Image (cartoon, helix red, strand yellow):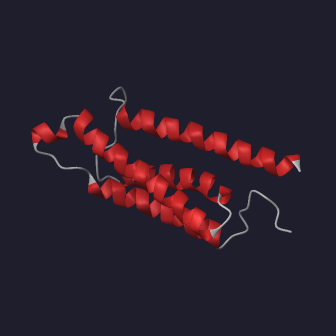
């Protein structure tokens, strides 16, 4: 049927747009960042990567595909934190990679995994 294919396509395109926004805002120095460790900063990380995972996870058909998608979203989070470390010259000032941000990203991905696992969130209709 055309409808499930259209739903998958829309979810995938929305995930690409969200991923592009996350990458841009993570590596752009042109906007004000909330202080690291603040509640708002933590919620932003949980929400951004949780929503990204929530858009992509229903595209996986098997449990192993869903875990691979979750791992890919978490790998994106880790890669962005490492890039921020080098782009913003944290290494020169003696600062470390913000591991707590990766933790918060992982919490968002795990919440998305739980939401997909224990809800009826499906892109295609089960027959």
Instruction: Name the residue rendered at 55%, 50% in the picture.
Output: 52
Q: Quadrant of the C terminus?
A: bottom right
9 versus 53 height, above or below = above
* Residue 40 in view of the camera: no
Q: How many marks?
A: 0
Question: 100 or 78, which lies in front?
Answer: 78
Question: 39 or 105, which lies in front?
Answer: 105
Residue 113, picture quadrant: bottom right
Instruction: Name the residue rendered at 61%, 53% in the picture.
Output: 56
28 versus 56 height, above or below = above
* Residue 127 in view of the camera: yes
Residue 4 left/right relative to 14: right
21 versus 105 height, above or below = above
Q: Position of residue 78 (x, y in %)?
A: 35, 51
Residue 74 left/right relative to 13: left
Question: 41 or 53, which lies in front?
Answer: 53
Residue 4 left/right relative to 116: right
Instruction: Name the residue rendered at 42%, 56% in the picture.
Output: 105
Q: Position of residue 117 (x, y in %)?
A: 63, 71
85 versus 118 height, above or below = above
Query: Residue placed farthest to the bottom in the image?
Result: 118
Q: Where is residue 18 in the image (x, y as percent from the top left)?
A: 55, 40
Q: Where is residue 126 in the image (x, y as percent from the top left)?
A: 82, 67
Query: Residue placed farthest to the right in the image?
Result: 1
């Amino acid at each position: 049927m055309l409808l499930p294919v259209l739903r998958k396509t829309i979810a995938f395109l929305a995930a690409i747009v969200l991923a592009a926004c996350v990458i841009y805002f993570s590596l752009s120095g042109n906007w004000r960042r909330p202080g690291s460790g603040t509640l708002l900063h933590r919620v932003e990380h949980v929400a951004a990567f949780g929503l990204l995972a929530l858009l992509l996870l229903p595209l996986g058909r098997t449990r192993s595909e869903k875990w691979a998608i979750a791992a890919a979203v978490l790998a994106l989070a880790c890669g962005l934190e490492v890039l921020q470390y080098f782009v913003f010259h944290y290494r020169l000032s003696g600062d470390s990679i913000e591991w707590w941000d990766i933790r918060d990203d992982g919490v968002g991905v795990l919440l998305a995994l739980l939401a997909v696992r224990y809800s009826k969130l499906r892109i295609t209709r089960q027959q």
